[in-house]
Image (cartoon, grey):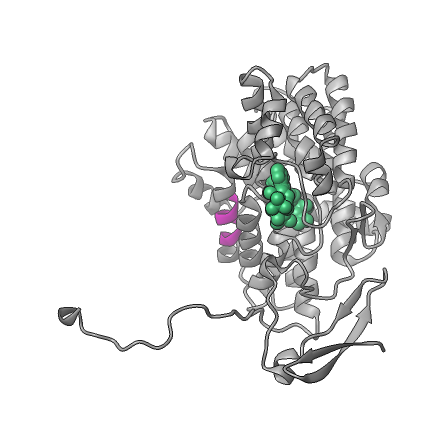
C-alpha cells in the first residue's frame, strides 16, 4: 500500500493511498483530524471523495460514462429504461424472466393511492411541477411506511420508480384541466407515460415509436451520474437513516436548481430569448464571457467533464433524428448548434474546457415531444430515479458509511458578553 506524507507544524504524517478499479488514486484522510487537529477545506467538494462506489464510472478527461461497467453509448441504443434501471439498482442486466417480472411490477405499481388524488386539488394550476413531484414523493411514505424487510424495500423501490411518472403526468393533465389518463398494463414504461401525458379518454392514443424510442434513450442517459449534487443530497439525507422517499424527495429538490437539473429548462428559455432577440447568439456568447454580466451559457460546462459530455453527443444526434422523423424544423436547434460551433472555437470556452453538457440539447427533444418547458427537469428527475435509488442502497449497505456531517472553519466573532436589550 503506498502512502502520502504531509508535513504539518513541523511533524510528518503519513496517510494511506488506495486505487479505484480505473486507477483513480485516493488519499485516505479519515485520520487527519485525529493526527493533526486540522481539517481540510474544499468548497464544493471538487477534490473530495465522499464514498467508494461500484455503480457509475465517469472519466471527465476522456468523456467516458459507464453504468455498472457498460458504456452509455451501448445502453443508449441497445437497451430500454426499465432494463437500465434494474442494472443500476441490482448490479446486473436482468435475464428475460427477471425483466418481464420487473416490468410487470412497474406497471402494476404505477397507480397512485387514490387518496393522493386529493393532493392535486390544492396546488395552484401555476404550481411548478418540481414542487409537486418533490412533495408527492415525500408523501408516498404516508401511504407506504413499511420498508424493514428487503421485500418491502424492493416494493417501495418499484413504487417510486412507477409512480413518479404517474404523478408527473397527472399534475400535467390537472394543470390543464384535462381528464387524467390511468396507466395501461399493455404499454411499456415510456409508452404509458406518453399516453398519460397526451392521451384522451375520447379516443385511442397511438404511441409514436419515434417518441417512445427517444424517451427511453433520454431516460437512460439521465439515469445516473455518480456523486453529483442531487445524488450527494440523496446520500446525505439517507445517511441519517431517513426513509427512501424522503431521501429521493430531497434529491428532486437538489436537482431543481438552474446550475444542476434545472439547466434544461433554462437552456430552452435562453434559446427562446436569443431567437426573440433576432437570433443574435454571438451577442450572448460575448455576454457569457463577461463575469459581471451575470449571464451564463446554460447547458455549457461541467464540474467533471473537461471534454465532451458523452450524453450531449448522443442527444444532439437524437435531436436531428427525432425532428426529421417528426418533420419538425426548430429554430432553437439551429441556434444551439451555432452557439456550440462558435463557443468551441472561442478561447474563453476552450481554456476553461467548457463543452455542451447533458442539458444543452435535451430540451429540444422534450419540446418536440410536446412536454412543457417547466416539466423538463421533472423528466430529468424521472430518469435519475434509478441512480438515486442505487446510490441510496449502496450508501445504506456501505460498512464505512456514517451520518454525513462535514466540518467547517469558523470565521465569526470571538466570544462576546451578552447585554440585555434595554442596555444596548
Ligand atoms: C448537470 O455533476 C453532475 O454530474 C451534474 C449532471 C448530472 O448528470 O447529474 O451532469 C447534470 O447538472 C449538468 C450541468 C448543468 N448546468 C448548467 O448547464 C449551468 C451552466 N454551467 C455552469 O454554471 C457550470 O459550468 C457548472 C455549474 C455546470 C459547473 O460549475 P463549476 O464546476 O463550479 O465551474 P465554475 O462555475 O467554477 O466555472 C469555472 C469557470 C468560471 O470562470 P473563471 O472564474 O475561471 O473565469 O468557467 C466559467 C466560470 O465563470 N463558466 C462559465 C460557464 N460555466 C463555467 N462561463 C459561461 N457559461 C457557463 N456555462
Hey, which residue is sitting farthest left in the picture?
A: 422
Count of numbered labels shown in the rendering: 0
Quarter of the rendered image showing ligand 1: top right
Looking at the picture, does residue 21 appear above or below residue 273?
below
Residue shown at the point (61%, 68%) measured from the top left: 148
Q: Residue 115 appears at what percent x and percent y?
A: 46, 46
Which residues, given as a range, are shown in magenta? 133-139
> Toward the viewer: 17 or 172?
17
- Give the dominant element type of the magenta stretch: helix, strand or loop: helix
* Residue 268 visible at all: no
Q: Residue 210 appears at what percent x and percent y?
A: 76, 25
> Toward the viewer: 410 or 92?
410
Residue shown at the point (72%, 41%) measured from the top left: 351
Residue shown at the point (74%, 26%) measured from the top left: 341
Looking at the picture, does residue 229 appear above or below residue 312?
below
Looking at the picture, does residue 177 appear above or below residue 398?
above
> Toward the viewer: 114 or 208?
208
Quarter containing the C terminus: bottom left
Hey, which residue is sitting farthest front in the picture?
A: 10
Quarter containing the N terminus: bottom right
Q: Residue 77 appears at what percent x and percent y?
A: 84, 36
Amino acid at each position: 500500500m503506498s502512502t502520502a506524507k504531509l508535513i504539518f507544524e513541523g511533524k510528518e504524517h503519513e496517510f494511506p493511498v488506495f486505487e479505484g478499479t480505473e486507477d483513480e488514486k485516493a488519499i485516505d484522510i479519515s485520520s487527519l483530524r485525529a493526527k493533526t487537529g486540522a481539517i481540510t477545506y474544499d468548497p464544493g467538494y471538487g477534490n473530495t471523495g465522499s464514498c467508494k462506489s461500484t455503480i457509475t464510472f465517469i472519466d471527465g478527461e476522456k468523456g467516458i460514462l459507464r453504468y455498472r461497467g457498460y458504456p452509455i453509448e451501448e445502453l443508449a441504443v441497445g437497451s430500454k429504461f426499465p432494463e437500465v434501471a434494474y442494472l443500476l439498482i441490482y448490479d446486473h442486466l436482468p435475464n428475460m424472466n427477471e425483466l418481464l417480472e420487473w416490468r410487470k411490477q412497474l406497471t402494476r405499481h404505477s397507480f397512485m393511492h387514490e387518496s393522493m388524488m386529493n393532493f392535486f386539488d390544492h396546488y395552484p394550476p401555476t404550481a411548478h411541477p418540481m414542487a409537486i413531484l418533490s412533495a408527492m414523493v415525500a408523501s408516498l411514505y404516508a401511504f407506504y411506511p413499511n420498508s424493514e424487510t428487503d421485500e418491502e424495500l424492493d416494493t417501495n423501490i418499484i413504487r417510486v420508480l412507477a409512480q413518479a411518472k404517474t404523478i408527473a403526468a397527472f399534475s400535467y393533465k390537472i394543470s390543464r384541466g384535462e381528464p387524467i389518463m390511468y396507466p395501461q398494463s399493455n404499454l411499456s414504461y415510456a409508452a404509458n407515460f406518453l399516453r398519460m401525458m397526451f392521451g384522451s379518454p375520447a379516443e385511442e392514443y397511438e404511441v409514436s415509436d419515434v417518441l417512445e424510442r427517444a424517451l427511453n434513450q433520454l431516460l437512460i442517459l439521465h439515469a445516473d451520474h455518480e456523486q453529483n449534487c442531487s445524488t450527494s443530497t440523496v446520500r446525505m439525507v439517507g445517511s441519517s437513516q431517513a426513509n427512501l422517499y424522503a431521501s429521493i424527495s430531497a434529491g428532486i429538490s437538489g436537482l431543481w436548481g438552474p446550475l444542476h437539473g434545472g439547466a434544461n429548462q433554462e437552456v430552452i428559455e435562453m434559446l427562446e430569448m436569443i431567437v426573440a432577440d433576432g437570433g443574435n447568439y454571438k451577442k450572448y456568447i460575448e455576454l457569457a464571457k463577461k463575469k459581471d454580466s451575470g449571464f451564463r451559457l446554460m447547458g455549457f460546462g461541467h464540474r467533471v467533464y473537461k471534454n465532451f459530455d458523452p450524453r450531449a453527443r448522443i442527444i444532439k444526434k437524437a435531436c436531428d433524428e427525432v425532428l426529421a422523423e417528426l418533420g419538425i424544423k426548430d429554430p432553437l436547434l439551429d441556434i444551439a448548434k451555432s452557439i456550440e460551433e462558435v463557443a468551441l472555437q472561442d478561447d474563453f470556452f476552450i481554456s476553461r474546457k467548457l463543452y455542451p453538457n447533458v442539458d444543452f440539447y435535451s430540451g429540444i427533444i422534450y419540446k418536440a415531444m410536446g412536454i412543457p418547458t417547466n416539466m423538463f427537469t421533472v423528466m430529468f428527475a424521472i430518469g435519475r430515479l434509478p441512480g438515486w435509488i442505487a446510490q441510496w442502497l449502496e450508501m445504506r449497505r456501505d460498512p464505512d458509511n456514517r451520518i454525513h456531517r462535514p466540518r467547517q472553519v469558523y470565521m465569526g466573532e470571538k466570544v462576546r458578553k451578552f447585554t440585555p436589550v434595554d442596555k444596548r
